[in-house]
Amino acid sequence: MDLQHLLAIALFALASTGTPGPNNLMLMSSGANVGFKRTIPHMLGIMVGFSVMLA
């Protein structure tokens, strides 16, 4: 992986964590409605989905 790709991924990660996108809003709503423990599978699904998209 060259420096250009690494910088692009780092910029994407920074923007994703800094802005409340649809996944973050869904997780916030799910956590408020059903609690943290029942939201963990949803969190894991989002992480797996992002990993598949980046692979």
Image: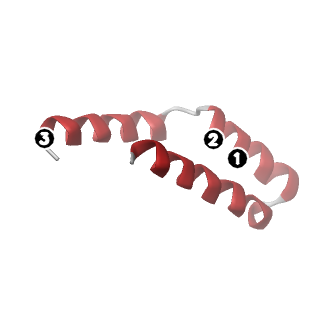
Tell me the kind of residue under disc 1.
Answer: Leu
Number of the front mark, 3 or 1: 3
Q: Secondary structure at mark 3?
A: helix
Q: Which residue is mark 2?
A: 24
Tell me the kind of residue under disc 2.
Answer: Asn
Q: Residues within 10 Å of mark 3 (few under 14, many from 20)?
A: few
Residue 27, above or below 35? above
Q: Nearer the viewer, residue 31 or 51?
A: 51
| Image-based side of 7 in relation to 34, left or right | left
Residue 47, above or below 28? below
Q: Which of the marked residues, 3 or 1, is nearer the chain's N terminus?
A: 3
Q: Are marks 2 and 1 in contact (CB under 8 Å)?
A: yes
Q: Which of the marked residues, 2 or 3, is nearer the chain's N terminus?
A: 3
Tell me the kind of residue under disc 3.
Answer: Leu
At x 86% / y 56%, what residue is drawn?
34
Q: CA distance from mark 3 to mark 1?
A: 32 Å
Q: Secondary structure at mark 2?
A: helix
Determine which of the numbered discs, if any, sits on residue 3 in the image: 3
Q: CA distance from mark 2 to mark 1?
A: 5 Å
Q: Secondary structure at mark 1?
A: helix
Determine which of the numbered discs, if any, sits on residue 27 in the image: 1
